[in-house]
Amino acid sequence: MSNPIIELEDRYCAHNYHPLPVVLVKGDGPYVWDDGGQRYLDMMSAYSAVSHGHAHPRLVRRLTEQAATLNIVSRAFHTDKLGPFLEMACEISGMDAALPMNTGAEAVETAMKAARKWAYTVKGVPEDRAEIIACQGNFHGRTIAIIGMSSEAQYRDGFGPFPGGLGLIPYGDTAALEKAITPHTAALIVEPIQGEGGIVIPPAGYLARCAEICRAHDVLLICDEVQTGLGRTGRMFAFEHDNVRPDGLILGKALGGGILPVSMFLGRREVMDVFKPGDHGSTFGGNPLAAAIGLEALKILVEEDLPARSADNGAWLLDRLRSIDSPLVREIRGRGLFIGIDIDPERATAREVCERLMTKGLLSKETHETVVRLAPPLAVDRETLAWAADQIEEVLGEMSAVGKPSSTAA
Ligand SMILES: Cc1ncc(COP(=O)(O)O)c(C=O)c1O
């Protein structure tokens, strides 16, 4: 069925995404509405950027107050908003200082630059020899340097050459980490749970062992918590599950309260002190509007106890979904409200499951061809999740009943 709004977007927008065929016009809490007035439960939350729910009243109020006061001045000047925002981010994460940016990829690039400069100025790595280790299956964003450490052929194809000094090891494999480290290694950049990679949870104690190995070899442990951070996995930060304190931390997505792009790289003092005036920057990073929203977003996470709600409701939803007996499902895994349903590619694609869920009023999005990702706003209630689980059970039941769809088998 053709929709002129979709046709217009299709005509003028680059085809770098393959959206579900729905036009959203409004959001409130865990729900969004399409142009025909149909309501959907948002189980994707803009890749976890909408952890606070759509149009959280406190954030909308803060946004409008600050927008009427002061928005963008650049960091050529001080503002009264940046300090309090970074102070709270450092206090809740145990980091000493932070560098504000806008998107996740920019904060990852900032971490890579910090790691390299730390290697040269603190560790004593010879000029231009610093190495950064990342993990196979990672997703850290889309810039040239970042895709230079991607193991996903499609993300790289046609975009080379890439910078040197970037190495890959298997995710979850600490022996491989120990083997890959050389005297020139600056940092390991790792997601505590791989999100875009398919909600991949490493073996228990993985991050703790990585921290030990990194410490023993004078290598920085940098956690990319752009997706797992700020309550998504049932703790404020996913590194807390392993009781580690990384040397560097990357935050984005939910830091902007589902309203603005707000990101940052945080680190130990020794790491952040490598930056001198003029070394790095961003016109918009740390602007007063973003800082006001970021601070309010952090306060809401703490005051509404969203990490604990994510832990409780996530554990419940995981159990409920695991009780569904379907031949389509290979595995259901997750932590907090960060759950993946791994679909058997011999029987269906994850996209087909998402399309069917959409017709029942539940929005999600596949990651790779096989995983349906579930990451609703963190304040979503149990009753709503029970309804969502019923829809998922129904869709899986209907798809099992029709048998193996030849057109969608991978
Ligand atoms: C772990 C992780 N790092 C970085 C990014 C990049 O963030 P952005 O899309 O805001 O550049 C993402 C986005 O999905 C992510 O999941």
Image (tube, rainbow, N blue to C red):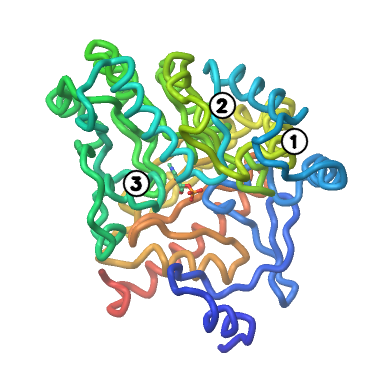
**164 left or right of 45?**
left
Q: Quick one: 325 or 134, which is closer to the camera? A: 134
The reply to whether the residue tagged 3 has its Cβ within 8 angstroms of ligand 1 is yes
Q: Which residue is mark 2?
A: 236
Indicate the position of residue 313 as horizontal and vertical percent values.
Answer: 59, 36
Circle 1 sits in a helix, a strand or a loop, which is it?
helix
Q: Which residue is mark 1?
A: 292
Say which label, 2 or 1, has the lower sequence index: 2
- CA neighbours of label 3 inside 10 A, class few (<14), some (14 to 19), many (20+): many
Q: Quadrant of the C terminus?
A: bottom left
Q: Quadrant of the N terminus?
A: bottom right
Q: Is residue 380 visible?
A: no
The span from disc 2 to disc 3 (Cα, nearest Å) is: 25 Å
The span from disc 2 to disc 1 (Cα, nearest Å) is: 20 Å
The correct choice, above or below, for 141 with respect to 117 in the image is below
Indicate the position of residue 377 as horizontal and vertical percent values.
Answer: 63, 45
Q: Which residue is mark 3?
A: 146
